[in-house]
Amino acid sequence: MRRSWVRGGARIIFGLAVFAVLATAILLRPPKWLSDFDQGFYITIAYDLVHHGVFSNGVFDAVDSTQAEPPPGRFFGPVYPAVVAAIVKLDPRFARAVDCNVENNAGRRAASECEAYARPVRIVHAAFLAIGVLAIAVAAELILGIAQAFWLAAVLATAALLPDADLFSFVMTESLTFCLYSLASLALIWSIKAPGAGKFLVAGVLLGLLVLTRAAYMVLIFVVPVLIFISFRRADRLTARAAGCMVAFIIACAAVVTPWMARNAISIGYWGLTEEYGSAALIERFAFNDMTAREFLLSFPYCLPTIGPPLVQAAFGQGAMDRFVYYTPRSFFHVGRNARDKLVEEHGRLDPLIGRLVFDEMRDHWWRHLLVSVPLGWCGMWVGGVFGLALVPLFAVAAVRARGVSHRLLLIYSVPALMMLGLHALVANQYTRYNLILIGPLATAGAWAALKILGRGGQAAAVE
């Protein structure tokens, strides 16, 4: 009992140390203007929640919410804007910064009056990330069956997050997405290790919250029950116990997601999680189908973290991969964004058009779309910056060489993240910020490799 208390205390102290490291890295980043990048989307919705009690479409509304109540919206999921709104209510200084920036965007205040202040959000982001790291560490321990995996996976996951400290300093969803996904994946592994309907209910609730943060994760509601089915031994798959676990998971997801869909049906007149968001992303993705054979081939070395861009630029010229960089004028990102904006200007809404647009694109360029998704997936998987250069190959080795229970659990743990990697390549773009959820499987594989090198016992030493 005493040893258990000591171990628990050590892990709490370690978790606080992880939080301190991540918070320091994020807080040291320069202040960000609250309208930069995608931040304006979330702070405007938070502003509308606080001032009008309405979850709106934010900057995509035709109504100036500094002067009038905006209509209800569903472009974004409700969880992250609600977090930002809660911080607005708790921190008056952040509230003033948000109000000023929203009013500046509406042309009602000068930018010089506004403060670039988001320290409480940055601290909350560090907390989300630390929780996600600890969830990865516990999952690695469950998968590999040895306590040392907890410490190794936590260190590797923390290291893999540090190169993206600047990204986490923005008021955007990445940290919350990483946290909820890591918790949901841990709950899945915990449930599989000792099956019970109650545990699968927890996994379902967490995945439901993740879906309400980013709607693309809705595909996992259909994927995870299959993984639950596979996790049971062949003789047990058609039993009432296996069916009960899958049903419990689905019911829990539905209990979280359905109220939001019902709210949309009542307030807006349309069932569904979101509107326009998926159509906009897909239209922007079509721009990548114009990729040349040269860009296709160069993308593989170019996307290697740290070493790729300078090598390609030295060998093929400074502008060889300009279209892969979102901030260059001729980038795929800007071409896709301009196409989207033009369609919105001409037709108002994208959802009624997307069926015909997809049909036309797939009829003429389906093979290009699938082919281009290969380098986009390749580029998107190198999470963790320079640490990814080691972790990605180690994951490939672990996936091939591992055997037994740990192998099965590692694959189940990895499948959802790999499927999201493929989905983002098909419908979004190559940026690693969409695939930070790969850090869990990569850190677990890194812990497996470290334990093999150290020759430690337990399942980790016997999975080969």
Image (cartoon, rainbow, N blue to C red):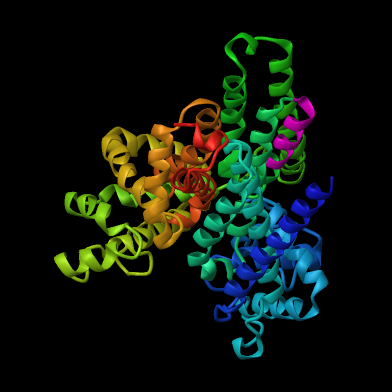
Give the residue displayed 57% in from the left and 21% down from the top.
230
Give the vertical position of 271 relative to 349 (above or below). above
Query: Viewer-proximal residue, 84 or 286?
Result: 84
- Give the vertical position of 462 relative to 387 (above or below): above
Residue 411, placed above or below residue 274? above
Whether residue 82 sits left or right of residue 116 in the image: it is right
Residue 36 percent across, percent down from the top left: 53, 73
Residue at point 62%, 32% (across, down): 221
Give residue 257's quadrant in the image. Answer: top right
Residue 35, image quadrant: bottom right
Look at the picture and state if 126 lies above or below 401: below
Q: Is residue 289 magenta?
A: no
Q: Nearer the viewer, residue 435 or 45?
A: 435
| Quarter that holds the C terminus | top left
Residue 249 placement (x, y as % from top left): 71, 29
199 drawn magenta: yes
Expressed as whole percent of the image width and height from the top left, the position of residue 278 reads 52, 45
Is residue 54 visible to us here? yes
How many numbered circles are shown?
A: 0
Residue plotted at (70% across, 80% down): 97
In x, y percent, where is residue 456?
53, 43
Q: Which residues are magenta?
A: 196-206
